[in-house]
Image: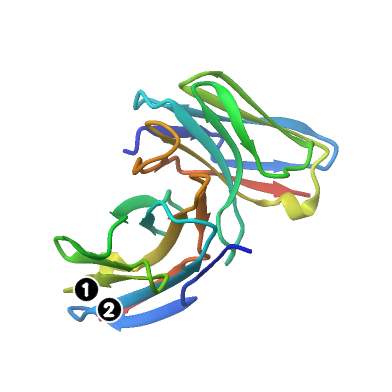
Amino acid sequence: ETGVTQTPRHLVMGMTNKKSLKCEQHLGHNAMYWYKQSAKKPLELMFVYNFKEQTENNSVPSRFSPECPNSSHLFLHLHTLQPEDSALYLCASSQEVGDSYEQYFGPGTRLTVT
Amino acid sequence: GQNIDQPTEMTATEGAIVQINCTYQTSGFNGLFWYQQHAGEAPTFLSYNVLDGLEEKGRFSSFLSRSKGYSYLLLKELQMKDSASYLCAVRDSNYQLIWGAGTKLIIKP
C-alpha cells in the first residue's frame, strides 16, 4: 500500500475521445507529479504541482491538461490523443519539491490510444 | 544535455551478489535515488545518496562518487522476489529528477 491511488488502472480510448485520469494521495504531501513511462525509456516528467501551484510543464503537448484542485488530488485531462501517447501514466507525490524528499508512486494507468 | 546511463538488463543467480551501475551527466547534482519497480507495479524507493560513500540498508547498498558521476546499487543474497527493474534518478540543480531507463534484473534459481 503506497498511499497513492490512481484510476482507472487501464484505459483504451480513440483519438477523438476525451477522458481524465485521477490521482489521489493519502500521505499529507504537498507536491504531486505526472510522469509518462514508455517501454525501455526513462520516466518522463510531465507536470509538477507544489502546494497546488503548477511549477513545471516539461514541453508537454496541449492535448494533456493537468488540474490540481487541492493538495490531495491531481487530474490529467486527455483529448485528441495520438497513438504514440500510449504508455503507462504514473502519478507521484512527495512532502515538497526539493531536498531529499523521496517520491511515492501510484500503480499507474495503462493507456492505449487506438 | 542531461543523461543517465545504466545497463538494460542483467542476470544473476539466487543467493549471489549483483552490482547495478549508473553513470550520470547532469546540470548540477542534488542527490541520487534508486527505485525498484516490479512488472506492472509502481516504482518504490530504495535508497538516497547525496554525499560520497556507501549507504547500507539490509541486503541493499548504494554507493556514490560525485567526482566520477557514478553510483551503483549492490544487492546481496539475491532472492527470486528481487527480479524487477531498478531505476536510477538524479536530482539536478533545478531539483528535477532525471531518470535512467532502468535495469531489468533477472534472477535464476
Quadrant of residue B68 within the rendered picture: bottom left
Above or below, A82 against B24 in this view is above
Quadrant of residue A62 within the rendered picture: top right
CB contact under 8 Å: marks 2 and 1: yes
Q: CA distance from mark 2 to mark 1?
A: 8 Å
Between A13 and A83, the one lying in front of the other is: A83
Q: Position of residue A44 (x, y in %)?
A: 60, 52
The answer for which chain carries disc 2 is B
A57 displayed left or right of B40: right
Tell me the residue that label 2 is attached to. Answer: B18
- Residue type, label 1: Leu
Q: Considering the numbered disc 1 on the image, is that residue within a helix, a strand or a loop?
A: loop
Mark 2 against mark 1, which lies toward the viewer? 2
Pointer 2 local density, CA inside 10 Å: few below 14, some 14–19, many at least 20: some
Q: Position of residue B67 (x, y in %)?
A: 38, 71
Q: Considering the numbered disc 2 on the image, is that residue within a helix, a strand or a loop?
A: strand
A77 displayed left or right of B59: right
Pointer 1 local density, CA inside 10 Å: few below 14, some 14–19, many at least 20: many
Q: Position of residue B91 (x, y in %)?
A: 45, 52
Hey, which residue is sitting farthest top in the picture? Answer: A69
Q: Residue at x 79, y 43 (%)?
A: A81
Above or below, A41 against A1 in this view is below
Tell me the residue that label 1 is attached to. Answer: B78
